[in-house]
Amino acid sequence: MHYKKGFTLVELVIVIALMGIMVAVATPRFANGDIFETRGDAGLISSTLRYAQKTAIAQRRQVFVITDTVAQPNSIKLCFVSDPNCPVAQAVIDPETDGPYVMTLSRNVRINPSNNSLGFDGLGQAVPNGAANYVVTNQKNNAQTFTVNIEADTGYIR
């Protein structure tokens, strides 16, 4: 008798089923979305700061970046006055919603600003003139931290 070399259909199906089970169990450990939330929110904070700076330059007046950790936790508002409540009449308009500009972070992400009401003047410089930073941390995994820095004098955001 002459035997052909190869695998039977049953053997192939069992191997594919076992591989599927292993992938289903291992994927959540490797594809954790926490790092993406943290990095994404750091990028949103950086974009919000740049929008505040560009609005201050375009309007030729001060724009304040107000970090709210009490009334609306984990949110950043843009306002023309440094009032933490930011009256609607003084709020910077969000071009997407035509309402007050409010950026809310992801559920597990927290920010720790060095200045809760940082501002930019009509030249784009930080008000008060000094370096500032926003530390973005994921509550699930404190090792995932990103820092957004604002340089003194120039207001450069990096």
Image (tube, rainbow, N blue to C red):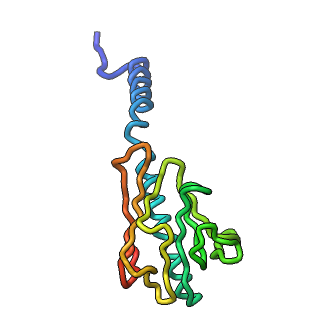
Q: Horizontal placement of 29 versus 77: left or right?
A: left
Residue 125: x and y, percent? 43, 84
In the depicted structure, whether residue 69 falls above or below residue 100: above
The image quarter containing residue 39 is: bottom left
Residue 6: x and y, percent? 32, 22
Q: Which of 32 and 61 is in front in this view?
A: 61
In the depicted structure, whether residue 153 falls above or below residue 34: below
Q: Which of 14 and 122 is in front in this view?
A: 122
Residue at (35, 21) in percent of width and height: 7
Q: Nearer the viewer, residue 11 or 83?
A: 83
Q: Horizontal placement of 36 versus 151: left or right?
A: right
Residue at (44, 79) in percent of width and height: 128
Q: Nearer the viewer, residue 39 or 28?
A: 39
Residue 126: x and y, percent? 43, 80
Locate the N terminus and report the quarter of the image it occupies.
Answer: top left
Residue 21: x and y, percent? 43, 26
In the depicted structure, whether residue 34 falls above or below residue 129: above
Residue lying farthest to the top in this orientation: 1
Residue at (39, 28) in percent of width and height: 22
Residue at (64, 72) in percent of width and height: 94
Locate the C terminus and report the quarter of the image it occupies.
Answer: bottom left
